[in-house]
């Protein structure tokens, strides 16, 4: 059985307080797994790394400094994923070589842009922003990973427009993202994002290994 789970996540900006808030958001987003790990006395650690290159660097360092842990790299896909292996996608997208001693279970991708996870749970968006929220312009799709990251379909801009007349004012990535992560219905996000479902499934299997006869 795994004794420790360590996740190295892209994002959070350049400042400690921003990273702390995003870490808080992800801790709540993964709360079901965190609770399950703790009941089995498995240590849990989330590190918010800033840029994607810093995330990869921190992940590589963790393989040396925490060799007995189940170390996970979690970064944005940034583009459509056409390869079966996430490492193959990152090799083509970022020219990152898969470190020795790891496999696909150690590598996970978020959607092309974080806001896609938020629109997977439109009800939470409505409740969070309240009166004045206008969701008519938000894309509706069964798979939010297919929404391209680009100026023609910029989800951050779309969310700002949808929330401009609410009491919380327009969507702000640093101020609002961590709060939304805490509130999201994980099941809805997993249904709309196969790679999100994949990380939950992978960690669940790692902390609940099959009993050998």
Image (cartoon, helix red, strand yellow):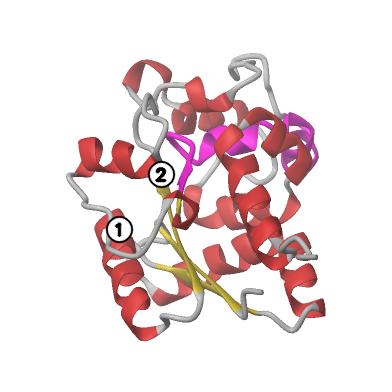
> Is residue 139 rendered magenta in the image?
no
Secondary structure of the residue carrying tag 1 is loop
Q: In the figure, is residue 211 to the left or right of 197?
A: right
Residue at figure coordinates x 21%, y 52% from the top left: 97
Residue at figure coordinates x 65%, y 41% from the top left: 197
The residue positioned 69% from the left and 57% from the top of the image is 205
Residue 156 vertical position relative to residue 186 in the rendered view, above or below:
above
Q: Is residue 111 magenta?
A: yes
Distance from label 1 to label 2 (Cα)?
A: 10 Å
Image quadrant in which you'd find residue 24: bottom right
Q: Read off the residue under disc 1.
A: 51
Residue 105 against residue 81 in the figure, above or below: below
Q: Is residue 29 visible?
A: no
Q: Which mark is residue 21?
A: none
Image quarter where the C terminus lies is bottom right
For discs 1 and 2, the disc positioned in front in the rendered view: 2
Check disc 2 and report the residue beneath it.
76
Report the front residue among 112 and 38.
38
- Coordinates of residue 1 in the picture (x, y in percent): 66, 74
Q: Residues within 10 Å of mark 2 (few under 14, many from 20)?
A: some
Q: Foreground: 173 or 79?
A: 79
Q: Are marks 1 and 2 in contact (CB under 8 Å)?
A: no
In the image, farthest residue toward the left? 95
Q: Is residue 190 visible?
A: yes
Residue 168 point in image, percent of width and height: 66, 46
Residue range in magenta is: 108-132
Image quarter of residue 194? top right
| Element marked by disc 2 | strand
């Amino acid at each position: 059985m795994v004794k420790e789970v360590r996740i190295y996540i892209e994002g959070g900006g350049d400042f400690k307080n921003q990273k702390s808030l995003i870490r808080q958001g992800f801790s709540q987003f993964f709360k079901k797994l965190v609770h399950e790990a703790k009941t089995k006395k498995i240590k849990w650690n989330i590190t918010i790394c800033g840029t994607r290159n810093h995330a990869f660097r921190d992940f590589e360092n963790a393989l040396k400094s925490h060799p007995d842990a189940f170390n996970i790299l979690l970064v944005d896909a940034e583009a459509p994923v056409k390869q079966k292996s996430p490492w193959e996608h990152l090799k083509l997208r970022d020219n990152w070589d898969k470190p020795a001693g790891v496999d696909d279970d150690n590598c996970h991708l978020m959607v092309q842009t974080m806001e896609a996870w938020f629109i997977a749970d439109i009800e939470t968006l409505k409740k969070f922003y309240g009166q004045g929220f206008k969701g008519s312009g938000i894309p509706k799709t069964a798979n939010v990973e297919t929404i391209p990251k680009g100026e023609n379909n910029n989800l951050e801009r779309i969310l700002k427009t949808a929330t401009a007349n609410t009491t919380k004012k327009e969507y702000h990535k640093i101020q609002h993202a961590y709060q939304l992560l805490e509130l999201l219905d994980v099941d809805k996000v997993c249904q709309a994002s196969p790679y999100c479902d994949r990380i939950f499934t992978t960690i669940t299997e790692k902390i609940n290994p099959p009993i050998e006869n």
